[in-house]
Image (cartoon, helix red, strand yellow):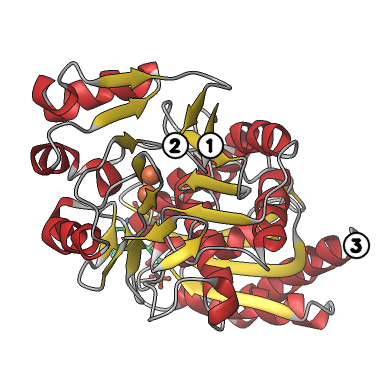
Amino acid sequence: MKLKGYVHYVGVNDRNKHRFEGLWALPSGVSYNAYLIADEQVALVDTVDAAFLSEFLDKIDALGVDRVDYLVINHMEPDHSGSIAQVRQRFPDIRVVGNAKTLEMLRGFYGEAALSDNYLQVGEGDVLKLGHHELHFHLVPMLHWPETMVSYDTTERILFSGDAFGCFGALNGAVLDTQMDTTPYWPEMERYYASILGKYAAPVQTALRKLSALPIDMICSTHGPMWTAEAGRAIETYRRLSAGETEPGVVVCYGSMYGNTQRVAEAVAEGAAEAGVRTIRMHNLVEAHTSFVLADIFRYRGLAVGAPTYNGGLFPPVEHLMHDLGERHVKGRKLVCFGGFTWAGQAAKKLQAHHAKMGLDLVADPMEWKQGASADVLERGRALGHLLGKAVLAEQ
Ligand SMILES: Cc1cc2nc3c(=O)[nH]c(=O)nc-3n(C[C@H](O)[C@H](O)[C@H](O)COP(=O)(O)O)c2cc1C
Ligand SMILES: [Fe+2]
Ligand SMILES: [Fe+2]
């Protein structure tokens, strides 16, 4: 599939994997994007997951290239680097292009043979001339690994961005944003960001500042559509998410065994609605896939978390969410917590302790109740939701 200049898409779709990185649900699959620049010098930009090696090589063969001179590695996570050793076997004269950290990882993952002594180490601002195309390399560390790099083609103004601006969701026929309805991919970009890049707001902002100097006509990331008409929207999405900008909505997350915490969660949602909040997302953490919960929390300003006390601690699915939030950049959210118990309450205290570490804005004391969700407990839940709703709307 030709994109622009001599650049072709040679990526593949994975519609079988259930969980990306063993964690993040893939209801619509995922693409592993790679690109072949069939210039005077032929360059591959990234490879694909090892499971798709033969399909990948077939796509390269179908372009009629009999040699590949360079393999540019923007990111070493195995969904892209997994077939490097085999690509080298197929094209023995290929020269690997990567930065110092990439080359060290290549040796560590795939052995000396994957690197051989035929490599080109590049650093910030280095240039590789292919003929018509000219690749300039920029280091963007911690997007989301230390070696992450982008390659910018000054001739056609194409940014090969690695995982940045990528999204979940396999590609269904077309690969260019202008040739498809991109609607389903935008929430999937946010879910990808929240799951995988959510810890790295500061490196994302640093990278955006660096990239702002480049005129970009096309973004070729390693997952999801190639962005041309909507390249600006992709960059704006990253700016907004990394800046921590939120919309006025409330996310209610809870776990429950016998329904008491769930009933309080419903009351909290009712209270927020009464306060005038129109977007309220409920997540039963026993059932929900974490990445969807995280994506909502990244988007909306208000967060309510509820849990039963369980073996002297938090009910495990809620503990898990608090752990995931603790290692992400979700500052400045308005938060309320609610927790029940039967003989010795811990849930509300533990939620408060997590909040103290996370730097969220607790708008009310944690709500705690003993045993059943009685009418007055539900009334307290409604009042808590109302307070949260008011705090969320006050900040517009
Ligand atoms: C396996 C298990 C462990 C529990 N551990 C505690 C505990 O350590 N302290 C306590 O006060 N209550 C404990 N409870 C009681 C629950 O916190 C209480 O029943 C709560 O109302 C359950 O909320 P739910 O109806 O939303 O599931 C435990 C309950 C279960 C089933
Ligand atoms: Fe990655
Ligand atoms: Fe990736």
State how far apart marks 2 and 1 are (Cα): 6 Å
Would you say 324 lies left or right of 203 here?
Answer: left
Q: Secondary structure at mark 2?
A: loop
In this rendering, which labeled residue sits more in front, label 1 or label 3? Answer: 1
Q: Please state the horizontal and vertical placement of residue 214, each as a whole percent of the image.
A: 71, 40
Q: Nearer the viewer, residue 341 or 296?
A: 296
Nearest the camera: 193 or 169? Answer: 169
Q: Is residue 341 visible?
A: no
Task: Report how far apart the C-alphas of labels 3 and 2 lie in the structure.
Answer: 50 Å
**Position of residue 288 in the picture relative to residue 22 (left or right):** right
Q: Note whether 367 is above or below 200 in the view shown.
A: below
Circle 1 sits on which residue?
134
Residue 71 location (% of width, % of height): 30, 37
| Amino acid type, callout 3 | Gln
Q: Residues within 10 Å of mark 3 (few under 14, many from 20)?
A: few
Asked which secondary structure carries label 1, the reply is strand
Instruction: Give the quarter the ligand 2 occupies.
Output: top left
Q: Which residue is mark 3?
A: 396
Q: In the displayed structure, does residue 74 sit left or right of residue 269?
A: left
State the image quarter where residue 368 is shown.
Answer: bottom right
Residue tagged 2: 130
Looking at the rendered structure, the kind of residue marked 1 is: Glu
Q: Are marks 2 and 1 in contact (CB under 8 Å)?
A: yes
Q: Going 58% across and 70% down the picture, which residue do you hit?
A: 186
Q: Is residue 192 visible?
A: yes
N-term mark: 1 or 3: 1
* Quarter of the image where one finds residue 108: top left
Residue 219 - label: none
* Above or below 245: residue 256: below
